Amino acid sequence: MESQIIEIDIVDWKVPAPNDAWIAGVEAGKVLYFPHLPFTLLPEEQALLTPGIRDPKVRNISLDARGHLKGALGDTATQLALALMIGRFREQAQALVYSLLPKYQGALRLAPTSFRPTQVETRAQSWRADDRRLHVDAFPSRPNYGERILRVFCNLNPDGVPRVWRVGEPFETVAKKFVPRVKPYVPWQASVMKALHITKSYRSEYDHLMLQLHDGMKSDLEYQKSAEQVTMPFAAGSVWVCFSDQASHAVMSGQYMLEQTLHLPAAKQYDPSASPLAILTQLVGHPLI
Ligand SMILES: O=C(O)CCC(=O)C(=O)O
Ligand SMILES: [Fe+2]
């Protein structure tokens, strides 16, 4: 299998010039890896690196698009410091993406920024929520009609502990394996789920297929073992960027990460035909949204 990782050795949060191979690579579902791109903490921010800062009722601490902090414990000063740290990462992540992918300017929609202080290995969860299994991202309650999920991840572990991922095979390979096994799409069920507010909007056939890929991959233990994959330790002080609705990924270990999600209409890509929407549409042979 061709490498699914492209290393880019820069030390500032912008690339000197856009690069066609990087653009085509990330739109093909590869992971852009910046091994030497630390997020610099202010001295007073070191104290924020503790798992106890997260409200146990939520999965991650997040800063929403309006700048509201959610899921953190602690006094006002702590909450303010967290919001400032996460907000600074948000700015740097966006600057990096705009330098890498200038055509996306004006087309990206900001989603929440997350801070993940919990040690991955100690998290207990159901198989469906377990990101230690290879998967592509798909969200059950939020249909997106093919809109892309672009993510910037940053390992800010202070003790040099890497965040270890597994990165799997290309999206087309995954889709060819799992699409033949999917449960059929039932439009009236999508209507019921919307009426009951199980989904925030009507679940399209595209969203159905993406969830089926997500669940199909995670529930197949043989696939988890035998699929082509590489184990990738993302170093402390590094950044990586990928379309997480396309790059097959799993997180195995690590602690302290910042993550920015940006949404992009597939039509605004450099090559819309590389999108999961285009690949799945081609595979099933009829429109999905
Ligand atoms: O926590 C991580 O490193 C990644 C988890 C994951 O699968 C995701 O955020 O989509
Ligand atoms: Fe994921």
Image (cartoon, rainbow, N blue to C red):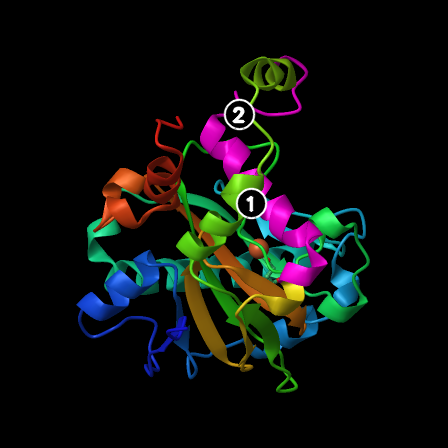
**Left or right: residue 20 compared with residue 25:** left
Q: Is residue 173 above or below residue 17?
A: above
**Left or right: residue 6 compared with residue 139:** left
Residue 218, position as x, y percentages in the image:
66, 53
Please check the rendered image and state whether residue 197 is part of the magenta-colored stretch, yes or no.
Answer: yes
Q: Is residue 77 above or below residue 35?
A: above
Mark 2 near mark 1, Cβ–Cβ under 8 Å? no
Residue 115, position as x, y percentages in the image:
61, 60
Image disc number at residue 213: 1
Q: Is residue 113 above or below residue 50?
A: above
**Left or right: residue 197 compared with residue 104:** right
Nearest to the observer: residue 26 or residue 153: 26
Q: Does any atom of ligand 2 lie closer than 8 Å to the CB of label 1?
A: no
Nearest to the observer: residue 253 or residue 44: 253
Q: Quadrant of the N terminus?
A: bottom left
Viewer-nearest of discs 2 and 1: 1
**Pointer 2: residues within 10 angstroms few (<14), some, or many (20+)?**
many
Part of the protein shown in magenta: 195-223
Per the image, the residue denoted by label 2 is: 203
Q: Give the mark nearer the N terminus: 2 vs 1.
A: 2
